[in-house]
Each structure stands twice: as structure tokens, then as C-alpha cells.
Image (cartoon, grey):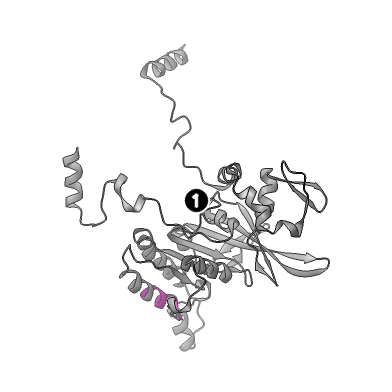
Amino acid sequence: MNALIDKIKKNSTIKETNVLSKSKLFSTKDLIQTSVPALNVALSGKLDGGLTPGLTVFAGPSKHFKTAFAMMLIQSFQNIGINTDMVIHTPITDIEQLKHDVMQQINQFERADNVMIVVDSVGNLASKKEVDDALDGKSVADMTRAKQMKSLFRMITPHLTIKDIPMVVVNHTYMEIGMFPKAIVSGGTGIYYSADNIFIIGRQQEKSGTEVVGYNFIINVEKSRYVREKSKIPIEVTFEGGISKWSGLLDISLASGHVVKPSNGWYQRVGEEKKYRLNDTYTKEFWLPILTDPTFGEWIENRYRMGNGQMMEGDNVDISDEDISEEYENQDM
């Protein structure tokens, strides 16, 4: 058998071909951990997780913090804040231009290269045909955009996995027509098939009395290879302080039972007598005992993370030939 394995590896024309247990492509992937635990949960289902290589899409209407989420991931990737001397900016005007340029770049990357790709935004890009028609004075419908979008991500996706590259794309949504319309990510099915994560961003106003002081942006997990789909994770952003490091944790800890609400406007860590006002929960001192409690991390993974256990229910049950024969005999009777 070992001789056959070696023969298959030797005959392959793909240099990354290897025994599955030794393949770099199936080893632990590099994580880009953010400073916001709830965002890590949305990205990976773990408090100490983060962004993984592959395609991640933030989609939503205008002014829904999509670009800010992408910028936060750039900052986390660089781990020093955003150093503009270490960012290459490439202006693009149409999908074909993006496709040709990004493939030229990505084809030259090696797995050891420490690089991240961000596109903001693919939802605003026209196709080359649409541009040419406008220049020629034509007003016919463009039927090529979705095809070009699918081609773009179909070509890029294998490289992201093989070369360990995270790619973040900002996109738009539109509402489907119907009695119960839902948000649809623009660009056709290609981006759905290729993406590891698709987050549709919702928004709720945060008020102090009657004054709007910020927003709760709700990360709706539309698709994920790591987090259960349809999960909703809130991220709070204020006009004065920006994104809250501790946002989303109060909702999660109330659901997990690690924090209780003994009376209106007051919060309390389980097992303690001290009570806190809402504003007093936005501190490291309040959250550190909870974040370091192993049961909190376990609850989050059980609640949000995709299962990776047995493939079929009952896989670990040993059924002998005698058991099967006896079952058929009982049915015949």
C-alpha cells in the first residue's frame, strides 16, 4: 500500500499532492484574531478565533459598517493598526479589470507570503460591456455581469485555499420581490458558491432617551463553514467611541446564563452579589472573569460553531452481521 501511495504522489503533476494526513492544505489554518470577541465568534464560532484564509463577504445596504468591518480585519492582520506604507491600493473600474489584475497578482504569490486581499466594493463594479455600451450610447440590459462575477470568484477561490490567503469582499444587497422579502447578496450565485463566509449586516438604532447615539449592527450569518447559519451576533458602534470591544457579549452571556438581570437596568455576574449598570459592563474588569471561564467558551462553541463530529448519527454504534440477519428474520415473522 505504501508503494502505491508513493506511486500516486510521484505521478501527480500537482506539486501540492500529498497524503491527506500530511497535507498542508488540511493543517490548522492561520487565524487573524480581532480585538472584538463577538466578531471572532461570527468569523469562527470561537472567542479566541478570527478570520481564516478563503473568501469572506460583508454585504448589506449603504451605511451599514461594511467597510469598517473590512478595515478592522486589515488592522488585525497587520497587528499594528493600519500601516498605509504596507498597503497596496489598486483602483479598478470594472469587473474584468479586477479579475485580470487580481489573478496576475495571486498567481505570483507563494504559500509563505503573508498577504491579505480586500475588495471594496464589488457591488459597485460595472462589467466592461456595461461601460462600453454607455460609451456607445446604448441602453440595452447587461447580461454579462453575473457571468463575469462567477468567473472571477471561480478562478480566485482555489488560490486562496492553496496559498493560505484571506480575502475580504464588501458587497451590496437588494430585497427580493414577494410577500415576505429577504435580503439577497448581489452578484449572482457565483459569490455564494465560492465564499467561506457571507455576512448580511442589519442595523438598529442605539438611543439615549430620544437621541440616537449609535447603532447596533447585526451580523447575520448567511453562509459559513465554521458558524451555524442564521446565527445573529450584535456589534455596537457609537458616534463618539466607535466600535465597542465588548459589544455583543452581554446578549451572549445573558443567553448562556453567565450574566443575569436581577432588576430593570441592572446586571449581575452569576455567583456574585455586586450589581452593575449597563455602562459599567463595558470594561475589561467586568468581562475578564467571564471570558476566562472555560464554560463560557464551551457554551459559545456549542451554540455557534458548526459540528465536526461523526458524519452520520449512530456511526459509533457497532452492528454485526448477526444483528442485521436477526432484524430481517424478525421482519419476516
Q: Badge 1: few (under 14), some or many (20 or more) residues near its Cα, within 10 Å?
A: many
Question: Residue at coordinates 48% horizontally, 75% vertically from top-left?
Answer: 83
Q: Quadrant of residue 272?
A: top right
Residue 160 position, x and y percent, is: 38, 62
Residue 189 seen in this snapshot: no
Of residue 61 and residue 36, the one placed in the foreground of this image is 36
Residue at image point 83% right, 66% down: 209
Question: Residue shown at 55%/64% (left/top)?
Answer: 58
- Where is residue 195? Give x, y as percent: 46, 59
Is 237 displayed left or right of 277 in the figure?
left
Q: Is residue 87 on the magenta stretch?
A: no
97 part of magenta stretch: yes
Of 330 and 8, nearer the camera is: 8
Q: Is residue 104 left or right of residue 128?
A: left
Q: Extreme bottom residue here? A: 136
Instruction: Tell me where residue 229 appears, x and y as whole percent.
Output: 56, 51
Q: Secondary structure at mark 1?
A: loop
Q: Amino acid at mark 1?
A: Tyr
Q: Which residues are magenta?
A: 92-100
Q: Visible in this render: residue 156?
A: yes
In the current view of this chain or complex, which residue is farthest to the top? 333
Identify the image quadrant of the N terminus. top left
**Circle 1 residue:** 226
- Residue drawn at the location 18% of the way across and 45% of the way down: 6
